[in-house]
Structures are given as structure tokens and as C-alpha cells.
Image (tube, helix red, strand yellow):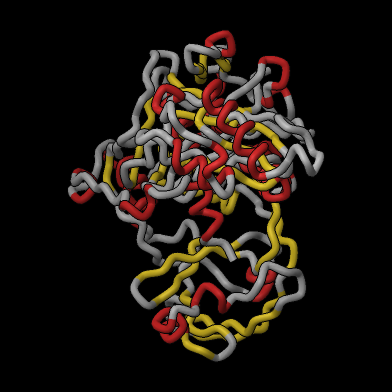
Amino acid sequence: MQPNILLVRIKAVTLLLASSLLISCGGGGNDDSSTGGNGGGSSSCSVIEQNRYFLDYMRENYFWYEDIPSAINPDDYASVYTLLDAIRSDNDRFSYILTEQEYQDRFVNAEYIGFGFSTRMIDDQVFINYVFDASPAAQAGIRRADEITAIDGVSVASLIASGNYSQAFGPSDIGVTRELSWRRPDGSEFTEILTKTEVDTNTVLATERFQIGDRDIGYYVLNSFIGRTGEDLNQAYNTFAGVDELIIDVRYNGGGLIRYANQAATQAAGNNVIGHPFVSLRFNDKNSDSNYTALFELIDGIQQLDLNRVFVLTTASSCSSSELIINGLTPFIDVVVVGQTTCGKPVGQSPDPFCDKRSFVINFETVNANGEGRYFDGIPADCAASDILVGDWGVNGDPLLDEAKYYIANNSCSAVGQVSLQTLTQSEEKRHPLLEQWAREH
């Protein structure tokens, strides 16, 4: 078994890979929900005590601990959040801190309170990136590529112009209602009242099986690596028995548990990789005894495809464990990356619990069986394609999926696909892509 990791610091006795609740943002985690560091008492969990504990932890376990200013005074900061911002390395755009409740909700329980959809904003328009199964949005008929045109009768354009768009969806409380209006790509319009509830965040958003010539193709959209991903993956792969090619779509996947990146890769390549090194975790020189190599294994999976080629669809939001699928498989099978350069996170965290929080700070780097890693500039696409919303998952006209189909049919990129695309923006660099992904979910 491998430790459960979010690409995080790991004590040998508590590696999360051994648990079904392993956390991994390209790294490992710890499902020990007990209070860490200073304990749970109110006196030992004062801001000052939390700051002091956190700084001590960082000096010992942070991958870039040598970059922490020597003269920093933890008592000068209003919270551990501001302290982290003050001491993070210039190399680090990935470390963050969650409350214990946020951690339990998103990684363990795989849910949040909302309507059940993710959006993107283009100028003064808002479009749907994806919808969770069985959510209020799905039940109302909202689909990927639909445009949200109004909230409670006020146009989205007006809400954006007035700076009131974010608040318009209301608080994250069960029972909050909003009247949403939306327009489909074909021009049809709808208005429904939606009520917020606990949304189960299914991690496989779509599965399709189709033909290209005499080739049988499997395609699925993998949106995150959290506690339920193993079961979701197994259900997806059960539909792909006998396929000739596989397309894994991680275009919005900000990362998560390493063990499930391993499962996704192993179920795809099967006997071509099982038992070989999937990823090695390398900690700082103070913690080198925690270095660990995880072998390819099925984890929660059953069906294996034994493919010698896999296509992976990516954007700048494809991060961490999503990138591990690519990097881990590359020494053993042909991996064709289609889309845009990935986010560039060859490092990970092991969540450390303290008081009512968990820190997700970078504790280690990851390398594949060939010792290859450090892709901080991202993994470039072999065939370029833009992420343009044209309809629901799997429709013809989706540039990323169409480019993969072209390659399967012609064994090469299209003329457009031979042009490099790099769309990572400064705004996307400010926070961990997983946090950006959650921030777009309502």
C-alpha cells in the first residue's frame, strides 16, 4: 500500500496512503483528525500559539525551509494565514491552510452547500463549466456550456458591472433559494427557482464510449482526487472493458489524493505498469527518512485495460495529481497530452492538523521512475487545443476532444494542434488551482 498524500509532509507512522481517506494534491496526507501541535485547548490555540507552532513546523518540514526569513517574529502576525504569506518561498504558489471543517467537507465527505455547478466568467458573461450529478442544478436541467443570464431577475451583466455578482448567489446555507435564468447554446431559455443543499461532488463528471474508424474509444472526465474518487473511477473503468484507446479529461482537475492518480493510471495501463514505480516522494534534507516510492497498483480498482497508449486532456487548471498521471505513465507507455500546458506542480503536501485547522504546505517533490520531475513551468501539450465551451461533455466541436480524436484517426496532431498554447495567467498563479476550482463552484 502507498501512503495517502496530497503531496504533503508525512510522518512515517501516519502516512495517509495507508488509509482510504488519503489526501493528495500531488502528494500525501494524513487522516488523523486529532488536534496537532498545540492541542485543542483554548489557551494553547491562541493566535500567538498557533503562529509559533506553525513557524516551528515550517522550519522543520517545509520543502523550502531555507527560504524562511531568519528574523521572522510569529507574534507580529494576525493569523497563521498572514504568517504563511510572509514566509512562503518565492517558488511556492501552492501552500494553503484549511479549517478542519473545510477539510472534512471537501476531501473526506466530498460535499459542499450550494446549487451544484461551476462557472467561468468571460467579460460580462458567465457560463457553466460543469454540473454535479443529482444536484439542484442538474435536476433543473442546467448543463455544461449554458450561460447564466440573470439571478433573481437581475441580469448577470448588471451584477458584474455593479460588483454584486459574487454575493448574488447568496450565503452557503441549506435552504437558500435563488431564481436563475439561463440560455443554452442553441438559444433556448429557461428560468427556475433553485434551493441550496448539500451537493455530492461526484469526481467523474462524464463517461462516453464511441468509435473512430475501427477503433473503440473510451472517454471520461475526472474532476478531482478525493475520498470518493476510487469508487467513481472503478465505475467508469467498468464501462471501458475492451476499448482500444482511452482519453482521460482532467482539464479542470486541480489535484488531490495521490493514491487515486495512481489508480487512474494503473487501471488504464494495467500489466504494462503494475509493480513498477509510479511516483517517488522526496522530502527536505531534515526528513529524508520519509522518502517513499509508491508502485503502480489498482488501489480500489478492479477493471484494468492494459493499454500502451493514453490521451490526457489538459489546461492550465490541470494540476498536481492530474500531472502525476502524465509523469508517472510516461516512462512506460505512450502518453499524448492534448490541450494546454499544465499548471506545473511537481511538489506536494501532507496535511498537518493543529487546533481547528490543517496546513497544506509543500513538504516534498515528486519524480517518476526515471527521476523526472521539477516541471514547475508545466507539462506542455503534444497537441495544442483551446478549452472552448460548445456544449455538454463529449459533444462534437469541443476543441480538446476533437484534437484527441484527430490524433487517433491520423496518428498526428492537426495543423492547429501543432501550435503551442500557454494560457496560465497571473491570476491563476496566486492560489492553489484546487482552491481556484472550489471558488468557482456555487
Picture residue at 40% right of the left edge, 64% below the top? 389
In this rendering, the count of numbered labels is: 0
The quadrant the C terminus occupies is bottom right
Residue at the right extreme of this rendering:
41
Camera-side residue: 111 or 211?
111
Camera-side residue: 334 or 250?
250
User: Do we see residue 56 in this rendering?
Assistant: yes
User: Do we see residue 301 in this rendering?
Assistant: no
Picture residue at 36% right of the left edge, 51% below the top? 400
Camera-side residue: 99 or 144?
99
Residue at the top extreme of this rendering:
289
The quadrant the N terminus occupies is top right
Measured from the top left, where is residue 256 in percent x and y?
57, 38
Camera-side residue: 29 or 409?
29
Left of 324 or right of it: where is 44?
right
In the figure, 47 relative to 441: above or below? above
Left of 206 or right of it: where is 308?
left
Measured from the top left, where is residue 246 in percent x and y?
47, 38
Picture residue at 56% right of the left edge, 61% below the top? 441
Measured from the top left, where is residue 13 in percent x and y?
72, 16
Picture residue at 43% right of the left edge, 86% below the top? 158
Measured from the top left, where is residue 53 in percent x and y?
64, 31
In the figure, 251 relative to 133: above or below? above
Q: Quadrant of residue 16?
A: top right
